[in-house]
Image: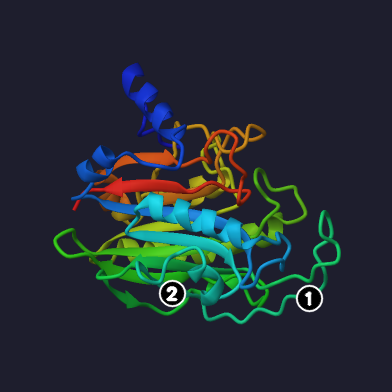
Amino acid sequence: MKSRLRAAPLALILLLAACAAPHTPSRDARASNAAALRLASWNLEFLAEKDGTGCEPRTAADYAAMRRIANDLDADVVAFQEAESPMAAARVFDPARYVIVMENRAGNPTGTCGGRHPEQPFIRQAVGFAIRKGIAFDRNPDVTSLQTGDPQLRSGVDVTIRPRGRGAIRLLGVHLKSGCFTGAEAKACPVLLGQIPALEAWIDAAANGAQRFAVMGDWNRRLALARDAVWSEIDDGVPANADLRLADEGVPPACDPRFDSFIDHIVLDKRAGRDMHSYSEVRYAEGEKHYSDHCPVVVTLGG
């Protein structure tokens, strides 16, 4: 695996400091990034339409807090995962600020949650984007090949955004099969590894296209680990723009002390990788409830 983020110690310190930032950015930081394109990803953990439903039942106050976090991200585009519907997503992403785009896959959730909420029925877990109002975009066909013939697996959401004066970029939102975080031996690995050829085919086709691109979401894979087979497979530099940049390379997560490597990733093609200004994980404030078992991650790109 290539290492593109090895730099002077001071640069590493600055990256780690950004990783540990709480969720409220400063006014100066927002002003300095005004010309940049801010891309974020956030797994919303069983985000339901209604209070008290789903495998992570929430109160109205929880939804309000999640909306405050989403507003503070000040992102142009957020790739999100595990939302039941556009109505559920709109409880977090203010419809006055964002247009919601979600995969067309209906899903057919069955059974109950188990764990802390055994009485709760499963809800649909879908992939989507929240796109800042005023940004032009094209909705491309969903990448149903990621389902590998299984309607319960999530498809990819494919959009091309055209922010005025900042250059078009194609974005793929994904949520791959959980349970194969490393190696190839876990029970879920044949499923996740079976999704990788479809993902690589999309990357290679996009690499031959006119726009820079990014693949964003919950990969359920620790891509930054040395010699990870999935990263080695997709980051092969063929075609040339498939020489990829893992935005979180060299940055440890701070969201949950149990984990020392990300599974939520923003992966940039060669062109977008050259435009990357910064990467950060936006963790919950000290003492604050974790409203999802994932923290948002954010990349800023130049125009």
Q: How is the image coloured?
A: rainbow
Above or below: residue 229 compared with residue 116: above
- Is 258 on the left or on the right of 78, as rendered? right
Image location of residue 285, percent across then percent down: 52, 37
**Which residue is at 39% across, 50% downward?**
73
Going from N to C along the chain, the mark reached first, 1 or 2, is 2
| Residue 126, position as x, y percentages in the image | 58, 70
Q: Locate residue 134, reporting x and y percent.
A: 25, 70
Determine the secondary structure under disc 1: loop
Which residue is labeled 1 in the image? 110
Q: Please tell me whether residue 36 is drawn above or below residue 158 in the rendered image.
A: above
**Label 2 amino acid?**
Val
Q: Which quadrant of the view contains residue 187?
A: bottom right
Q: Residue at 47%, 77% (x, y): give it.
A: 142
Cβ–Cβ under 8 Å for marks 1 and 2: no
Q: Is residue 41 among what the camera can see?
A: yes
Q: Tell me if mark 1 has few (under 14), some (14-19) or many (20+) residues whose alpha carbon lies within 10 angstroms of its own.
A: few
User: How would you rate the neighbour count of disc 2 (Cα within 10 Å): few for under 14, some for 14-19, many for 20 or more?
Assistant: many
Checking the image for residue 45, the label placed there is none
Q: 50 and 235: which one is in front?
A: 50
Q: Residue at x 24, y 38 (%)?
A: 28
Q: Which residue sits at x=52%, y=55%?
A: 66
Side of 172 relative to 292 (left or right): left
Up/down of 139 relative to 24, above or below: below
What's under tag 1, amino acid-wise?
Thr
x and y percentages locating residue 53 in the rendered image: 71, 68
Task: State the count of labels.
Answer: 2
Can residue 218 be seen in this snapshot? no
Q: Separation of disc 1 and disc 2 at Cα?
A: 24 Å
Q: Residue furthest front?
A: 61
* Rendered image: mark on residue 101: 2
Looking at the rendered structure, the secondary structure element under dot 2 is: strand
